[in-house]
Image (cartoon, grey):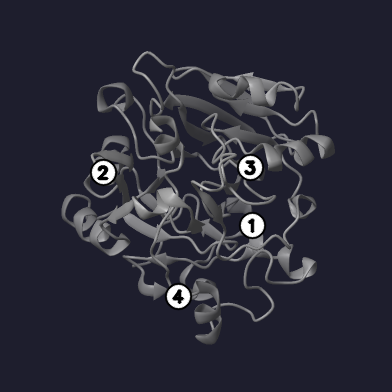
Amino acid sequence: MASVAHVCFCSSTSRSNAILPKYRRHGYLPSSSVGFGRSSRKSQNTLFGLRNFRSTKIHPTLCRASTELRVSEEMKPIKLTYLEGNSWLWSLGGVNILVDPILVGKLDFGIPWLYEAAKKYITNEFQIEDLPELDCLLITQGLDDHCHVKTLEPLSKINPSLQVISTLNAESLLNPLFTNVKYLEPGQSLKLVGKNSANFTVQATPGPVLGPPWQRPENGYIVSSEETQLSLYYEPHCSYDPSLLNEYRADVVITPVVKQLLPSFTLVSGQEDAVELAKLLGAKYVIAMKNGDLDAKGLLTKLITNQGSTESFKKLASKDLPEIEVLEPIPGIALELPVNSEIPA
């Protein structure tokens, strides 16, 4: 039961209003581009170029990106597309990186009576074939909500030689599927060249220990792009040891900010821990992911509670880190960050 508690961290009993239709009503999104699985294949292919996001500093709600951000093609902006749960698609200087993907079926850890979750905004109409050409697949943990075999099996059939970077805890799942896997321990790094000849580096950092104390920790990652001259940190539990992370720096921190709790146990951290994480890494941006915002059912969901909110995190961050940008991604819509340029206040 303890191991199930560790992995089933992404459930939530709260239900928010549908985000994307609200934004469309207010004129922020084109009517044909409302997210993966809710639009035609043609409009899906345009989503990576949109620059819509919510920011504490620029605008109290979703800003109109066409006027707020003016980023030239030469600046090669960072584009971060949230695919719900722990899943992301990043474009860093033209390098496309898929992270902890769940794109096929539901998340259930093989025990749907205990926990089963589906995405709220990105439906199963979105296909793996809709992904852009990938340079790298990142896997942070060896559990189903990060290393989702239902997704990885068809992905490996399409691209068995895809460069995969992973924790060793996923070795038994990945080795039968992909031919080009590099397993990194915390502290190790790998320099890579994308298909567009862009250089990037993946540095593994210590993540949570999901099991007995002697078990190998899972991974976080710092991805650095030579083209953008920026670095991005990602660890989906907001779990870190300051003494092991204080030597690193990252311009962008992607982290949960709402705590997810079981009785006497923290599944996912956030709030003040996320503030300290951003401070430790010297971040300019915090991307506040909501990996507990899923349609979940099962016995475990009745035990999980949330602590804090994105708004309470913003208040905490504004006290200790007044210059930092806190951004809320919209599932399925590319959040675009400028490179070597200040966002106007």
The amino acid type found where label 4 is placed reads Asn
**Mark 4 element type:** loop
Work out which quarter of the rendered image holds the C terminus and state it.
bottom left
Query: With respect to residue 243, does 223 lie above or below?
Result: below
Label 4 sits on residue? 17
Measure how far apart labels 2 and 3 are at the Cα level.
Answer: 33 Å
Measure how far apart labels 1 and 3 are at the Cα level.
Answer: 22 Å
Label 1 sits on residue? 73
| Left or right: 270 in relation to 224 | left
| Left or right: 53 in relation to 44 | left
In primary-sequence order, the first of circles 2 and 3 is 3
Determine the residue positioned at 83% across, 39% down. Answer: 158
The amino acid type found where label 2 is placed reads Pro
Determine the residue positioned at 53% across, 58% down. Answer: 336
Measure how far apart labels 4 and 2 are at the Cα level.
Answer: 27 Å
- Report the mark closest to the observer, 1 or 3: 3
**Mark 1 element type:** helix
Across and down, in percent, residue 223 comes to: 52, 34
The amino acid type found where label 1 is placed reads Glu
Label 2 sits on residue? 263
